[in-house]
Image (cartoon, rainbow, N blue to C red):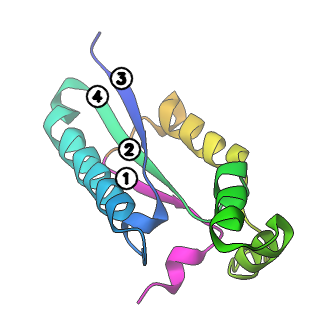
């Protein structure tokens, strides 16, 4: 077809993890796959990018951590939100979806090989 867009979903944990080595390494591999596919397929007009969500307010994250640590979901939600520089509030699945939509659409036709943090500024604290 002469082009296309691939959007992978990685995680901020791929570049700034801590305690989930299998998850972090698998997402780091997704980052490398993204940049490699972008480079090798640009000549065909195929773009490849990845979204790196940071702390998101999702049932899997909040409820899972609450069960694993014996905390209430509200306590987990408040602690996670407090870590986010932009507004002191976690993102939502919609924030990830909107970033993926942008990377998939024609408005991003000159964007490839990008690892886009959607993290409320958390990645700017790395280092």
Comparing 11 with 95, the one in front is: 11
Residue neighbourhood size for the residue with mark 2, other residues' Cα within 10 Å, grouped as few (<14), some (14–19), many (≥20): many
The residue most toward the bottom is 127
**Residue underneath mark 2:** 49
> Residue 34 at x, y = what percent?
28, 45
| CA distance separating discs 2 and 1 | 5 Å
**Residue underneath mark 1:** 114
Q: Quadrant of residue 89?
A: bottom right
Comparing 81 with 121, the one in front is: 81
The residue at 65%/58% (across/down) is 64
Q: Is residue 76 magenta?
A: no
**Residue underneath mark 4:** 46
| CA distance separating discs 3 and 4 | 5 Å
> Residue 1 at x, y = what percent?
29, 9
> Residue 121 at x, y = what percent?
61, 74
- Mark 2 or 1, nearer chain start: 2
- Mark 3 or 2, nearer chain start: 3
Q: CB under 8 Å between callouts 4 and 1?
A: no
Helix or strand or loop: what does disc 3 sit on? strand
Q: CB under 8 Å between callouts 2 and 1?
A: yes
- Mark 3 or 4, nearer chain start: 3
- Mark 1 or 3, nearer chain start: 3
Residue numbers of the magenta segment: 113-127
Which of the numbered marks, if any, corresponds to residue 4? 3
């Amino acid at each position: 077809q002469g082009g296309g867009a691939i959007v992978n979903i990685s995680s901020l944990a791929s570049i700034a993890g801590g305690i989930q080595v299998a998850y972090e390494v698998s997402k780091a591999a997704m980052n490398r796959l993204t940049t490699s596919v972008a480079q090798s397929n640009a000549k065909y007009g195929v773009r490849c990018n990845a979204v790196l969500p940071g702390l998101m307010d999702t049932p899997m994250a909040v409820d899972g951590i609450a069960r694993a640590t014996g905390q209430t979901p509200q306590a987990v939600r408040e602690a996670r939100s407090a870590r986010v520089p932009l507004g002191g509030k976690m993102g939502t699945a919609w924030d990830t979806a909107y970033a993926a939509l942008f990377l998939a659409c024609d408005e991003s036709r000159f964007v490839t090989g990008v690892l886009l943090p959607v993290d409320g500024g958390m990645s700017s604290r790395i280092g």
